[in-house]
Image (cartoon, grey):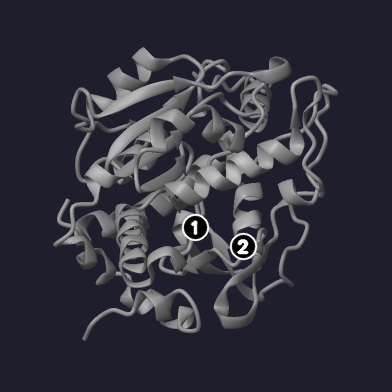
Amino acid sequence: MPIDIDYLTTVGIADAYASRAAIPGLASDVELAPRTCCLTMLAGSGSRWVASLEAARAAGRAAGADPRAPRGLFPVRNAMPFGPDPAPIASYALAAVRDLGRHVIVVRGWEREIEERILGPFGFEPGSYSFATQAAPGGKPRGHGDAAFQTIGLWSGYDYVTVNFGGDASSPLTALAAVAAMAALERELGDRAPGLLLPAALVDSPAYPIRLGPGGLPAGFGHAKLSGAAADAGAADAGEPGYTNVGLRVYRAKALREAIELIRERYWSEGNGYAIPGNAPSSDGFGGEFALDNVDALLAAEGRARILPIARPEELSPVKSLDDLPRFERDVGAVREDWSALGL
């Protein structure tokens, strides 16, 4: 029976998870890799990560990590069926998209370590990737949306752009299925295809719930970065299930570029940085952050975003501090089944 991606990303989203293992097969007769750019965010270490390292040292528990390094280089258990053990945290995010297309890795230094510890050991071919250093307007990086803007010349010539993050328990099945599904929607719908396809998981009490509107289309996202509120703002009631996005997005490159350019035109100025309504202001007085969440909200408002609820709940397991490591290592054990399902 043919897989109806249009149905599974609109009124039939409740049926999507049951088809998760079959959706990657849509890519079997289509060359997606030459048309896809994989943008991985691996810049910086994060304030919560650095604070947890400092707290560990103060408590006499040396974490053995350089606080200047991206947290994606910190070693954890390798639950993948290849590569060294232990493996850097970011090896999961990068390995999950290894064969999907050209790679652009956003960094702020540490390129040699990333090559030696991740790209080489996990089979990335020389020439299949490039590094892009995220500039810091006003003295500090201004978000993943700004990173996507800065790399626009590296990905805008492709048809599809995946964006993922170096601290997530990523699944190669979810990544391949999402790109294959986006390509299927474009073949079927042409210019009416969505600009964003957001893999999602159904979880209890999501901290960042996706609010659905008519026809199963996303009408809003419970992201703190869009509200300037606390991290748990907009969370569902305790125990109430809801959809939430995991650490992967798939865009049509043209739609991503249009959205970024529109946000820049409306909300960026050289002297003041970003002033995006609803985003929390920066503590340094130079504007706020430009998040990819802002791109997603814009595309959703235009009716050009869809969700694909095929992700495992365990994929929603980002490492933000040392305290997150036990859960991350447990959850990547569950995600291992997805590597096996693809014969990897």
Q: CA distance from mark 1 to mark 2?
A: 8 Å
Q: Residue at label 1?
A: 196
The location of residue 122, given as percent across then percent down, is 23, 32
Q: Residue at label 2?
A: 300
At 56% from the left and 42% from the top, the residue drawn is: 324
Is 220 left, or right, of 80 in this rendering? right
Is 141 left, or right, of 195 in this rendering? right
Pick whichever of labels 1 and 2 is earlier in the sequence: 1
At 41% from the left and 46% from the top, the residue drawn is: 162
Q: Is residue 103 above or below residue 99?
A: above
Is 96 left, or right, of 82 in this rendering? right
* Amino acid type indicated by mark 1: Leu
Q: Are marks 1 and 2 in contact (CB under 8 Å)?
A: yes
Mark 1 closeness class: few <14, some 14–19, many ≥20 residues within 10 Å:
many
Q: Is residue 238 above or below residue 37?
A: below
Q: Is residue 13 above or below residue 173?
A: below
Nearer to me, 84 or 141: 141
In the picture, residue 23 is in which quadrant?
bottom left
* Amino acid type indicated by mark 2: Ala
Q: Secondary structure at mark 1?
A: strand
Nearer to me, 155 or 104: 155
Q: Secondary structure at mark 2?
A: helix
The location of residue 223, given as percent across then percent down, is 69, 54
